[in-house]
Amino acid sequence: MRILQVANFVSPQSGGIRTALAAWARRYQALGHEVTALVPEAGDDPAQWWPEHPDARTTPGMAVGAGYRLITAQAEVMRLVDRWRPDVIELSDRTTLRWLPAWAASRGIACVMVAHEHVQDVLTTRGFSRAVSCAVADLANMGAGRRATTVVTPSRYAALEPARVGVHARVVPLGVDIEAFHPRLRVHPGRAGGGAPGAPGTPGGGPLRLVHVGRLSREKRPWLSIETLRALLQREVDAELVVLGSGPLAGDLERRAAGLPVEFLGHRPRAQVAETLANADVALAPAPAETFGLGALEAMACGTPVVCSDTGALPEVVGIGGSQRDADPRQFAAAARALAADPVARERARRRAVAQGWHASACAMLATHAEAIARLAPPRRVSWRTRVTDARLAREGVGE
């Protein structure tokens, strides 16, 4: 197959979508398929800021704040698609590119739309009323169902939103690189999970090391990680927090954390992220509306258990690899202490992640693409002679 990935919201600082596209692309290529990605320009050559992708191209876009850009050059996209002639377009967008599926179909090109976000939850966390958020989400999902050959979501939770307006979405969970994110990166393998005394945060056990990884934006609720640390310190638990990621709330969070043992590392290369996750005792994932949660899965692959919100797709992803709690700092703090003292929490987290590798995710996407291509293809015309022969062979039982 020739696969063209087209996406908005991919930039040098972006996370989940960028990671997924590159991971799928490398495995598509390894399995013998051709793949190219088309994303908004970000100033530099994509080979410099997105080396993980085997063939990334850019096209003019419009800045929308917080480091993101949207593709707006519709004519340029049409020209590139006509020139490349893919078998299928893997579209990760429902904004400025919503015209693409219908136009591609007119060219005989299938389009698989990947709905990475839960529209209603994103709008609600940004202050819109539930009624407005629901109405906008329903319109977006009805449009996706009408235009795309197939709709894909990364979790069962995410699939519930299009299902509300009668759009069936195929669930293809994302994955994790279980070799790049591995417990062997932990400097002191025997430190955590030994139970009291000596468990992290207890006398003789050293500080309870927490890590938060993700974009520092409102919909990710990163302040809950800082308040979790504060709750632990108020209970005289020796604890510290490392924050990985950048975003519009960075300055506010640094002011909120003044005087607390918090280290803000900003956006870091994948290798450093993996090392930091592996050397934490517990990872915090407070986002209320994740449709998957790659950061949580990467932490578990490193053997680090996760405390996550009990809403969205995170409980579905984390499972036995951690603990799900209400969005309350005291509950997060209690869960973090329990996981740090659990002698088998790290083994459970790793076991949960190993079952969710990228190879299976890519194979499921390839199967989806193949089905979309077959669905869009016109029915094969069969001559009357062939139909008569097939009927005669069926009556005679030939081939049974």
Image: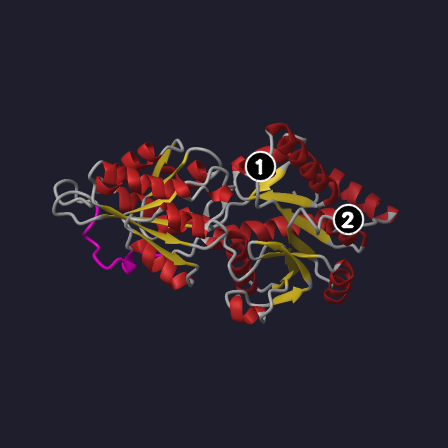
Residue at 12% across, 42% down: 197
**Residue 23 relative to residue 195: left or right:** right
| Amino acid type, label 1 | Ala
Q: Is residue 115 above or below residue 76?
A: above
Residue 104 picture location, percent across and down = 76, 54
| Amino acid type, label 2 | Ala
Q: Which residues are magenta?
A: 181-192
Q: Is residue 297 visible?
A: no
Q: Which residue is mark 2?
A: 102
- The residue lying toward the viewer, choosing from 97 and 148, is 97
Residue 55 picture location, percent across and down = 59, 68
Q: Which residue is mark 1?
A: 159
Residue 233 picture location, percent across and down = 24, 41
Q: Is residue 91 above or below residue 334?
A: below
Tell me where residue 170 sits by quadrant.
top right
The answer to whether the residue labelled 2 contacts the one labelled 1, judged by CB atoms less than 8 Å apart, is: no
**Quadrant where the C terminus is found in the figure:** top right
Q: Dot 2: few (<14), some (14–19), or many (≥20) neighbours within 10 Å? A: some
- The residue lying toward the viewer, choosing from 286 and 370, is 286
> What SS does tag 2 mark?
helix
**Residue 203 relative to residue 387: left or right:** left
Q: Dot 1: few (<14), some (14–19), or many (≥20) neighbours within 10 Å? A: many
> What SS does tag 1 mark?
helix
For marks 2 and 1 on the same chain, the one whose residue lies earlier in the sequence: 2
Cα–Cα gap, marks 2 and 1: 22 Å
